[in-house]
Image (tube, rainbow, N blue to C red):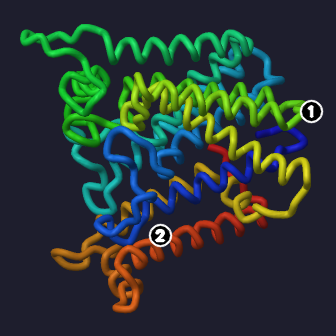
Amino acid sequence: MSYKKRIESVDILRGFTIMAMILVNTPGDWSYVYGPLLHTEWHGLTPTDLIFPFFLFIVGISIYFAYKNKPNNNSTYKKVAIRSLKLIGLGLFLNAFLPYFPFIQDFETMRFPGVLQRIGIVFFISSVLYLNCNWKGLLGLSIFILLGYWLFLGFMPFPNPNGITSTFERAPNNWANYLDLSMLGKHMWQPDYDPEGVVSTIPAIVTCVSGILIGKLLDGLTEIKWLFLVALTLLVSGYSFNTYFPINKAIWSSSFVLVTSGWGTLILAIIYYLKDIKRFEFGTVFKYVGMNAITIYFLSSLVTKTMYLIKIEADSNIHSWVYNAVFVHDFFGLKFSSLLYGLIVVVFYVLLGYVMYKRKIIIKV
């Protein structure tokens, strides 16, 4: 966000989101994790399911303030495209990277989608839309995508000889899963679906666009009640839509978009009221991470992957050795030990963010 007077609540929410993302991605032992720190198996919503849509929501807010005074010309599009390609490239690097020879994974089975890839694609499309549409156009397009996605997944006839109808379940006749498998084949997270797949990226764009619209609302906001009213509208409409199109992160359902954007708006409104209006002093620790959010997320993912892949013994790697040697004790429950490991990892990256912040090191991706 490159405007003179930064909205501190946005920086705080961004930093909190990245810290939460690191926490849920780095437990000591995946077999022992508290329920709220896991994604729901299919339909439903846990606190962990809020993290990625929150980040896309914040990307949308940042797009609004970064490009609101930028000209709609080739130079601006070039900058948008370069940043998008950087994000996609970093994501592909994470998927391909091996900390030993041959240093890259077998291309035949390497996963193509990922968190950074989705951020890059969504950032590019959302930025182009913002540069070419007013807020009414963005709102209308968002409604069209959410309703169209529901109608397509739920009612579009499915191509099969046995009369099997389309479904929202994790099944071969789910359109999102079916099309992703057709396009990506072995390059998916799971054999039958990918949570950052091609089809579900389309409604994810609406999550980002919702952030753009909230950014416009924040710009010159005079009464905080409007933020709370928008949050309430999104939450009520999302939970109501859940009856017809279940809340589901894996396929990024339309109800999931509405509910997560509603929660994002509500939490932002609370932070905005306390920090930007009442000027309460809190949340500085989150700003340290938020100023270099992508860099810190990338480094945490790279280090974690390296620790898992470098073997110490046949059945042990650096991660498991450190975890078992330092964090597993008789007086700790295994879930608590696993959580404690994740919290220590978060503290490490907060300290890294603090050092970068104090030295005025801001790496723009």
Residue at image location 49% in from the left, 61% down from the top: 300
Q: Is residue 44 left or right of residue 209?
A: left
Q: Is residue 239 left or right of residue 277?
A: left
| Quadrant where the C terminus is found in the figure | top right
Residue at image location 79% in from the left, 26% down from the top: 216
Residue at image location 70% in from the left, 60% down from the top: 286
- 116 vs 336: above or below: above
Q: Quadrant of residue 192?
A: top left
Q: How many marks?
A: 2
Image coords of residue 254 (percent x, y): 47, 25
| Quadrant where the N terminus is found in the figure | top right
Please rate how many residues cluster around mark 2, counting C-alpha atoms within 10 Å: few if below 14, some from 14 to 19, many from 20.
many
Please rate how many residues cluster around mark 1, counting C-alpha atoms within 10 Å: few if below 14, some from 14 to 19, many from 20.
few
Image coords of residue 205 (percent x, y): 54, 25
Q: Quadrant of residue 110?
A: top left
Residue at image location 83% in from the left, 53% down from the top: 274
Residue closer to the observer: 171 or 100: 171
Tell me, for residue 135, which label it has, or none: none
Residue closer to the observer: 331 or 103: 331
SS for dot 1: loop
**Which amino acid does the dot numbered 2 rest on?**
Gly
Q: Which residue is mark 2?
A: 342
Q: Is residue 213 left or right of residue 224?
A: left
**Which amino acid does the dot numbered 1 rest on?**
Thr
Residue closer to the observer: 315 or 208: 208
Q: Which residue is mark 1?
A: 222
Image coords of residue 342 (percent x, y): 47, 70
